[in-house]
Image (cartoon, grey):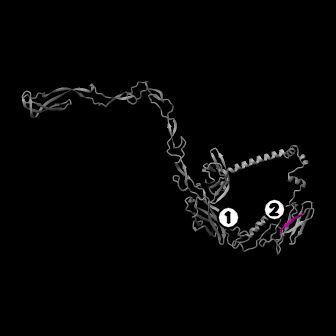
Amino acid sequence: MKKKVLSISLILVILLSLCPDIRAHADTGVAFYLTHKHTGNKDVCGGCYTSPHYHVHSDPGSGDCYTPRYHEHTGSPSGGGCYTVPVPHEHTGDSTQAGGCYVPRYHSHNSDCYRRGYCDWVRTLTITGSEPSWCHIHGDIYQVLADVTESHSSCGLGSFGGQAYYCPSCGYQGELGGGTHEYSELVCTKGSYYVEGYVLGCGHSEGDLDHYDPGCGMEGVIEGYDLTCTKTSLSVDQYDPGCGMDEGQNAVAVKVGQNRVSGGMEITVSLEDQSGGVIDVSDAGFIWKDADGNELGSGNSLTVSSNGTYGLEVVITDEGINPDSCSGNVEVTGIRPPGSDNGNGTSDEDPEEDDGTSYDDGNSGGSGQEQDSGTGDDDDTYYATATPTPTPTATPLAMTDSGSGNSSETRTTESGSKWRNDDDSGSDGTGLDVQAIGSGIPVDGLNKNVTVEKKKVEALKTDAGNKENLENGEMNDTDQSKSGGLLGRAGKFLKTPAGKVITIGVSTALLIGALFLLLLLLRNLVIVFNFDGHMKRHFTGLAFIRLKKDGYELEIPDEISSRAYTNRYEFFMGFFMIGRERDIEIMVIKKDRQMMVKVERMMRVTI
């Protein structure tokens, strides 16, 4: 085993020696990712927000779609309906502060409010003119016109009067002059709105039936909910992201490669779209900077002459990329000083100048030949040692050991190679032909000491007659009798016509059942494809449709989603549509995401 490992190691060292520039090209790796940023907003359809979120009424008792309907008492406090509890009257308020049953008692003038007084009055007559008239005594006359005025001094009547007409011959017939009269003088200062106290004004006596209180026990109880929302199932509450990506998800991989060139290292950059075409990278540009932030150049490549950290900024106009993720660093460590050894015997300055490679075969002694360790290893191993010759040849040589018994023999071939055979294969005298590679095999001008191992192959020796019977699956009567009662009788029965009929029937039933299960499997089998960043479709695996209580479900297995390039999938539904309606829907599930889509023969979904 150790010799095998050593041989493989020698071959790898030889290949590295033949290809000194094999390490000059580093694998392209991802330096950093451009992450996704949703564009638009949920209130307006546009950008990433293109999936309408239709209104769904909230459950009664939660949300704004339903308004609680509280119990409303029937009847009135006078009785009836919900008002069934009698309440006796209890006076409220008091006679000094009013309120409740007490009302104000206003002042009313009485005899105590007045006193007796005396007033002087005088009535005077003032002639103002005359006019023709007729007197029943004196005939045609000119009657006198006069003003009569009466004035009171203290009773409050003041002065008042009127006009008088009289015959000058008859004279004024009214009373003139003056006099004194009595009157009642108001001496009370209280007005009609003066409150002298408070009295009961409710009209009830203490203990009388006042009213009825509700006795239904439904005060403040919600009897139901009324739908007051004006929206319908076609109303859009908001728009959800329809781009198929999450906020902050890796959208574009920035891949950087390093190629060793004369004078330094060439750094190349490329973009790999992982968004399934959501992000447009066609107009992307690149800016290179040093560790201090100074701009070194632009374009998709940069040649540097020293190791260090270099900045890379991606310039992209697509608004779906988070600008904070557009820059990263590139570490360069593979540049060696001029003239330094690159690890395979050559220098970085001219890796092809030295056409020979120093090599150590790992054997001490320097003889160039394998020595028998004398440990008694019983592996039948043939060793071949080759020595350099001026004219090497690659002609295979054959050596046959036809000796018998245990022997150890060393032979020399025509090319000068020595072979030693440590034979411990037994005493049957069987010879083994060993094909060996001749000495001096050229490997780009190098001669190597190569050890060729060959393990002993032991042939299974069985009785020829028994082997033939085992291959044909047959047993003779003697062997059947030896095998035991039940098994022997079963074998005999299966050879009878009835046994053959039963065998054919059971085999046919099993075949039909297997075909039915196969058709059922194929009917629910779905072929899953995934699109890469260049809209190229790739086969990613198989999935199965399951029938649940609420309908059909198609769950994308984790092993498929882990191999997917983007979130854009295509499903080939196969035989699932045979015999089914065209307008059915299926729930597509990917981890914690769900999406209801209409079933089609080739169905594309971004999830």
Q: Nearer the viewer, residue 542 or 35?
A: 542
Q: Which residue is mark 1?
A: 27
In the rendered image, the residue lying farthest to the front is 497
Q: Which secondary structure lies at badge 1?
A: loop
Q: Is residue 577 left or right of residue 477?
A: left
Callout 1 amino acid: Asp
Instruction: Decide: is 138 above or below 470.
Output: above
Q: Nearer the viewer, residue 3 or 566?
A: 566
Image position, residue 402 (x, y; %)? 91, 65
Q: Nearer the viewer, residue 470 or 63?
A: 470
Task: Tell me the crowding category of disc 2: few under 14, some 14 to 19, or many 20 or more residues within 10 angstroms, Cα based.
Answer: few
Q: Which mark is residue 2?
A: 2
What segment is highlighted magenta in the picture? 431-437
Image position, residue 153 (x, y; %)? 18, 30
Image position, residue 12 (x, y; %)? 76, 66
Image position, residue 597 (x, y; %)? 60, 50
The residue drawn where x is 49% and y is 35% is 71
Q: Is residue 470 left or right of residue 159?
A: right
Q: Is residue 144 left or right of residue 203?
A: left
Can residue 370 be seen by looking at this rendering? no
